[in-house]
Every structure is written in structure tokens, then in C-alpha cells.
Amino acid sequence: MQENNCISWKNVKNICLSAENIVLLQSEAFFRKQQTNLYLNLAIMATLKIKVPIYISSVLEESFYSYPEMCQCIEHIINAYNNRRSDEKLSFTQRAKLKQKVIKLIQFDRYNFGNTPALLLRIEEYKKNNKDLYIENSMTAEQRDIALEDKIGSNYNYVLLYPLIRYLDNGNVENRWVAFVYNDPSKEDVDIKTTTHSVLSKILGLSVKAVMRESTRNRLHRTPVIPKVVANYVTVNNRPNDQVDLRQYELSCKSTRKITYQNLPQDELMYLMNDQPEDVVSKKITVQFNKNENVKMTYELNTENILIQTLIEESNGYEITLEPEDVATMHEPINVQQHLGDIITRFLSNEVALQND
């Protein structure tokens, strides 16, 4: 059994400032290298989690009577996208931001989960128009500014597409896709969310919604009073009264507001979740069940100007505990498949009712 797996900041300070290391610390390059190694060791000692947000598509317009047919259709779409010219690839920016993201390539492999084939997508993307960034060589401490035309890329953005077929009494079928997003510790939540959601909706043409665990859904509907709820709104054209005479010159006006509720009745919570307030372009509802359990629901306007749920973050959502020795290989496809296999099994056993929603 290992002892003393954690290094306190007090001990770190003592190590760095100990008398026998004073001479070595005079070398700036040495200090930087030691500091980098120290942070890496602390990160490895921490408990790392791979979060797995899940999306489910609406019923597909085209009917498929077998899983291989569903996979082939997605594969044809991806191959067509990969054959586009560079200037035809999907690109997008955040509102009022300079940085631009481009989906460069989508690799895919089929894996069988039981008797069901599924598609593991590996999305390659890069960002350009980067400003105020530099790279520093860890050995020489030499810095190089990143130019606007430079591309900062990411090769390992994984999404697993699992097909669902529901056979109806009249002989017809309903088809859906379930998307399991591999949000590993090297990714920013918002970044992986925008990448995967854009690929699913804008390239594959799937209308998807975030999946909430059935246990959390039941808790939201059955808890009579919620201790704390926080609602954050982003609105447009919400101007002060003393500036109404400037309205003709405005292109748009955005503002944010935050409302905190205490001991909110369950029916009022349902109203907050389903409300479509005017001039609101996005909202985030955080439901705090207790100190350690919460669920955050993000809603954004779709092309029909309707607020739809695009992200669900559960404090006890689907996730994978990553051992320190597994960090170096967490992007290998076979390991991604194995990590997601258990999540798929749990999802199919716990959330099977979602197929009929």
C-alpha cells in the first residue's frame, strides 16, 4: 500500500526553498523545468475523470431495418465531407470572437458491442486567428509568438455513435442515434461540446438533444421543494430606458442577468425549465439538490428561435475514473472503446425508456 500519495503546497515550498537547493534555483531554466515536473506530478496524483455527456437524436427521416445500414449511411456522409476542399470544411466562431474553429477531418471505425455495430468517430479540428499566444520551449526557454495564420490543432475528439432500432406494430421502424462524447481531462467542456454538437447537427444532419439520466429526471419531477435554483439568462435588446432614443442606431444589445431562488416548488421549477422568455438567446438552470449534488441544464436558440436543451451536466453523471498509468494511452481507440463499453451497457439498461420519447 502506497503511503503519502499527496504533496502539500507547504512541502512543495519547503522543497523549493531548502538550503541545499538555493544554488540550483539560481538557474532560471532549471527552476522552470523543476516547476513543470512538479505540476505534472501533482496532476497525475489527482483523481482524473472522463466525463461522458450523451445525446440522442430525433427519429431519422429515412428508415433502416438493420444496424449495418445505419452505419453505412453515416460513413457515406463522413466520406463525402472528408473529400471536400479545405475552404469547404465546416468552420465557425463564437459570437464576437476572433478565433475560428475548423473541422478538418473525421476518422471512423466500426466496433461491435455485443451483436450491435457502432461507429467510433475521431474528429480532427484546428483553431486559427489566434491572438496573444506564444509557445515556450521547455528546454531552452525560447519563446515563439503564434501568428494569426498558424493553426493549433487537436486530433483526438472522440464520439461514439450507437444505433437504435425500434420495431413498430405496423411493420415499420423508428431509427435513432445515441452519441457518447468522450470528454477526457485534456479537453475543455465547452470546446468539446461545440465540436461534437456541430459535427452531429451540421455535418451528419442529426437533430440531437442532451440526455439526462432517468434517476435525475425522476428526482426533478418528484422533489416537492428544491433547496436552491440559479437561473442565468443572456438577453438581447434589453436596453436602459434612458437610451431608447438611440434605438435606431443599435445593431444589437446583450446583457446577462442572474436570479437565485430558495426553496422553489417543483411546479415552478418545471416552468423555469420550459419557459421561452422573449429576447433570451440562452439560459442556464442550475438545480442544487444538496451541497454535493446538482444538475446544470443549458438551453440555446435553435434555427427556429426556440430554446432547446443543448447540454446537461450532472454532478453524478456518467463518467470513467482514469488511473494515472492510463493517462498516456487514454486516446488510443481500443482504450476509448473499452472505456465507453461499460457506459453503453449502463445506458441501455437504465435509460431504455428514452427510445420511446
Image (cartoon, helix red, strand yellow):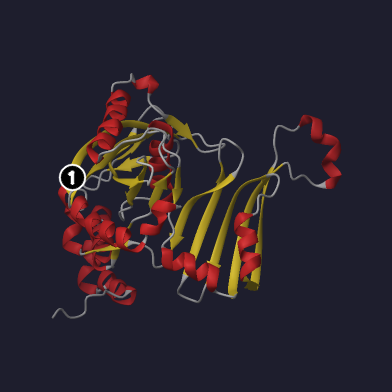
**Image spot of residue 189 (x, y percent):** 41, 52
Q: Is residue 51 left or right of residue 228?
A: left
**Image spot of residue 346 (x, y percent):** 29, 62
Where is 303 relative to 37, above or below? above
In the rendered image, which residue does mark 1 sit on? 111
- Label 1: which secondary element: strand
**Image spot of residue 4 (x, y percent):** 21, 79
Residue lying at 39% horizontally and 52% vertically, measured from the top left: 355
Q: Is residue 182 left or right of residue 333?
A: right
184 or 242, nearer to the observer: 184
**Image spot of residue 61 (x, y percent):** 42, 34
323 or 78, nearer to the observer: 78
At label 1, the amino acid type is Tyr
Where is 34 relative to 130, above or below? below
Residue lying at 28% horizontally and 21% vertically, measured from the top left: 83
Residue lying at 41% horizontally and 55% vertically, measured from the top left: 354
Residue lying at 32% horizontally and 46% vertically, measured from the top left: 164
